[in-house]
Image (tube, rainbow, N blue to C red):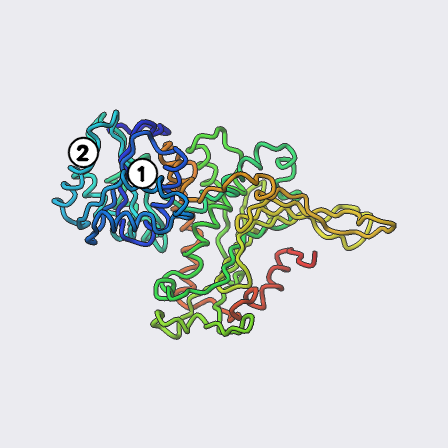
Amino acid sequence: MTTDRKVAFEESVSIVVFGASGDLASKKTFPALFALFSKGLLPKKTRIYGYARSEMSKEEFSKKQTSHIKSADEQADKIKEFTSLSTYVRGGYDDDKDFRQLNSVIEEGEKNMPEKNRLFYLALPPSQFADVGEHIKKECYLKEDEGRIRVIIEKPFGRDLKSSRELQAQLSPIFSEVELYRIDHYLGKEVVKNLMKVRFLNTVMMSFWDNRFISNVSIVFKEPFGTEKRGGYFDDVGIIRDVMQNHLVQVLCLLTMSRPVSTSPEDIRDEKVKVLRAVRPVDAKDIILGQYVAAEVNGEKKPGYKDDDTIENKDTKTPTFAAIPLYIENDRWDGVPFVLKAGKALNEAKVEIVMQFKPVPGALRDHIPPNELIFRIQPDEAILLKMNTKYPGLNDKLVVDDLDISYRDSFPKVAIPEAYESLILDCLKGDHSNFVRDDELDEAWKIFTPILERIDAGDVKVHDYKYGSEGPEVMKEFMQSKGFIDDI
């Protein structure tokens, strides 16, 4: 089997989605594949196979594939074409016979293909990765020089360093690192994919991107809703494992890494690993944890975290909010706090990066608000530079205004692709740049595992905060202690 790096599947591919009856496949994977198909970005000869344990007719599978496609009524013809490329195969995840049947179905579809390429998308819990991987290797793998194999797997990649390494130890004998694509969908978001371009292709940005000019940085994830009957799952995970150790850390890497020697995936990921290795151990006394409690929001009573019926332990201390400052001990970033903040049931929906600059030396007037560079990841993607300027008129009044690149205003005719659409296309191209390498994963868990062990043991205080608020009340003082100025 051929395993060349960065070789695109241009002519043909067989895409197999395991877990085809599940929410992830129907809400994310299939809509992303349809979007690529409708834009003509799938290989010329593509076949799609759904595989799951559920009994489904062709019609039921087609409905499962298309139930979350936006504006479906306006794309009826395209949807019909898309579903005609698709086949459903029922089978178990631990049965050789079922995988042999799957392989036979794939081989039948490959008869008219100029080359054999197979992409296996494991929309499954990590506990099933190894079993499914072994059966793929045994029954559905391609022989030497027949074609290429690629395998996409979804987070969580463990819950701590030990379990992450155990998972990797199970997978590494089955698939090579070249074949594996660990997906973190934040790496597919448009503003996140733009970070390297903005940083390394603009002289003005390169000139101030270090601790000489930057005072502090916040990487913020805010959701305005709670666990919504998913508390049983969330209570075993918590906000740090859910979004911080993965999504926000990947953003941190792209924001702080040095310029790679080339744009090759390995050179990019090498620089990300260097950043993670330079992060100082987290001090448990220097973090803020929170858990939301019931409150009235716009006249509506909202439940607290422990009110979720799916949570069994009503004394749970699982954090739904966390603020953790990370310090990168290298020449570029020494002394700059990078505060990762994430929470559920907050006052708004927002994901953004806020970089605050140091005061103007020898300023000509007092109380000058700091400049800020903001990357708004969602909603309404934008890049904003907050600057001090004179208010127009016969006065000397100072105001803060934005120089902004609003994606909606600057590119009104461009539909921003969904993250999964972008990442599946990267995989088809053989581009690992926006996927997580094994050593990246290892270094990220090294940062968070010690503090997670303290949290799981109940050694770190968890503050209450009201549903719909900005988080624990202690956050204002905490952010001020990191140099953050919020009265702009």
Label ID, residue 107:
2
Q: Residue at x 63, y 44 (%)?
A: 211
Q: Is residue 83 left or right of residue 284?
A: left
24 vs 4: above or below: below
Which secondary structure, mark 2? Answer: helix
> Farthest residue in the right direction?
394
Q: How many marks?
A: 2
Q: Mark 1–mark 2 contact, CB under 8 Å?
A: no
Amino acid at dot 2: Glu
Label ID, residue 81:
1
Q: Nearer the viewer, residue 72 or 43?
A: 72
Which secondary structure, mark 1? Answer: helix
Q: Is residue 484 left or right of residue 104?
A: right
Q: Nearer the viewer, residue 71 or 31?
A: 71
The span from disc 1 to disc 2 (Cα, nearest Å) is: 21 Å
Q: Nearer the viewer, residue 308 or 410?
A: 410
Quadrant assignment for the C terminus: bottom right
Across and down, in percent, residue 243 comes to 44, 54
Label ID, residue 258:
none
Label whose residue precedes the other's in the sequence (1 or 2): 1
Q: Residue at x 32, y 37 (%)?
A: 177
Quadrant assignment for the N terminus: top left
Q: Is residue 333 left or right of residue 37?
A: right
How crowded pointer 2 is (Cα within 10 Å; few <14, some 14-19, many 20+) is rated as some
